[in-house]
Amino acid sequence: MINLLSYPFAWNHLIFSSNPPSKLLKIALFVKKWPIGSHAGGLERHAMTLHIALARRGHELHIFTTTSPAGSSVIPKSELGNLYFHFTKPTPGGYLDQASVWEQFQAENKTGSPFDIVHTESVSLRYTRSRNVTKLAVSWHGIAYETIHSDIIQELLRSPQESQANALAERVNKVVEEVKFFPNYAHHIATSDHAGDILKRVYMIPEERVHIILNGVDEDVFRPDISAGKEFKKRHGVPDSKSLVIGLAGRLVKDKGHPLMFEALKQIMAENSTFQESSIIMVAGDGPWAARYRELGENVVVLGPLKQSELASFYNAIDLFVNPTLRAQGLDHTLIEAMLSGKPVMATRLASIVGSVIVGSEMGYTFSPTVNALKKVIYESWVDGREVLHNKGQVARQRGLKLFTATKMVAAYERLFLCISSANSDDHFCQYQQSVN
């Protein structure tokens, strides 16, 4: 018998029942923004995937979030009668107004039954309020200690013309701040194995208050579909003669590594005409580096932001997905979307990625964040060819199905919420019976 609150590994490894829960919860979610269209960030998409699924499981969900930039508070379309939205006007910085949202929360908490569990995505609910709530869990999608690695990378990649940033010194102070205020949250959910270790070892949160639940995406959307991939390539003018189709997706900004990827591709195309003739790069997403990618010519197809269904077809159209991120935070959704689509993945050798996602060369490639290292693995994947890439993609998909599905993530969160909400009762939600083979 396992005490789940002390379980040291990712809960995604455990198998929870898919039957309807024996107890239904009233859940409060605090999230800075609710996703709108195809421009949503990872945190917002995580919040939506998780909490809509919990509502479908029968739980009563109350979403405390900000109105849209236009000031509207149009309730997102939903067929669920147990999903409620509570909007407040954001602060000038775009955050939740703590006084207003707390007033809303307290009013709802006195309506009918009180909340069984409170969930905040990152610091959407500030620690000045959270310290008053015992049945609360915070999901961390990035903490300051992880970001120190990103700051080091950015400094090493800085050109002589750029002025030196003070980010490293500032970041250490930020870590000290976080170590001081993090204990004001009752329970902590780490979205990667590495973050879980840091919370326990560096931030000194007691082990029974730190729980690792890896991000998951909808496995019914992100799955292999050969015909959808062929149609996508045809629609965007990708000729069948191309033996390697590389895909990039997400925000096309500096800290996601796009200057690095741009320079690597630029050099490869200049020095290797065969690669240029046999390969093509498809880029999904928006940001300032979209225009730079277009400068590389007809070998790069810039698609702009894609809706979820189109993004699923995009993954099926490529042979290899590359994420050159320089942000050592959280667990990027694009990697696990590609893996569930049966594609091998290539990513920067960051602790959260090699610790939870690309745990071996049998499912993809990792590289140090330098132009030469990235060029080397791109060439390696090109030489490996489609058959090797396909086999790596199959291994990647199996790992994705084991750990990174929305079903696995939702089941883990539901069980954690049930456990926290009934920790002092006779319910046995905090106990897990290990199966014996």
Image (cartoon, rainbow, N blue to C red):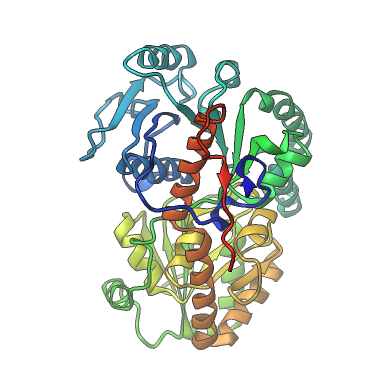
At 48% from the left edge and 50% from the top edge, which residue is drawn?
Answer: 409
Query: Depth check: 376 or 61 in front?
Result: 61
Query: Depth check: 345 or 168 in front?
Result: 345
Q: Is residue 274 above or below residue 104?
A: below
At 47% from the left edge and 65% from the top edge, which residue is drawn?
Answer: 401
At 54% from the left edge and 54% from the top edge, which residue is drawn?
Answer: 12
Choose top left, top right, bottom left or bottom right for residue 46: top left
The image shows a total of numbered marks equal to 0
At 48% from the left edge and 27% from the top edge, which residue is drawn?
Answer: 118
Residue 157 appears at what percent x and percent y? 71, 54
Residue 39 appears at what percent x and percent y? 38, 45
Choose top left, top right, bottom left or bottom right for residue 3: top right
Is 165 on the left or on the right of 78, as rendered? right
Is 245 on the left or on the right of 168, as rendered? left
Choose top left, top right, bottom left or bottom right for residue 175: top right
Residue 8 appears at what percent x and percent y? 68, 48
Query: Depth check: 406 or 391 in front?
Result: 406
Q: Quadrant of the C terminus?
A: bottom right
- The answer to whether residue 164 of the structure is visible from this angle is no
Residue 107 appears at what percent x and percent y? 37, 12
Query: Depth check: 222 or 96 in front?
Result: 222
- The answer to whether residue 352 of the structure is visible from this angle is yes
Is 242 on the left or on the right of 152, as rendered? left
Is 192 on the left or on the right of 168, as rendered? left
Q: Is residue 355 above or below residue 133?
A: below
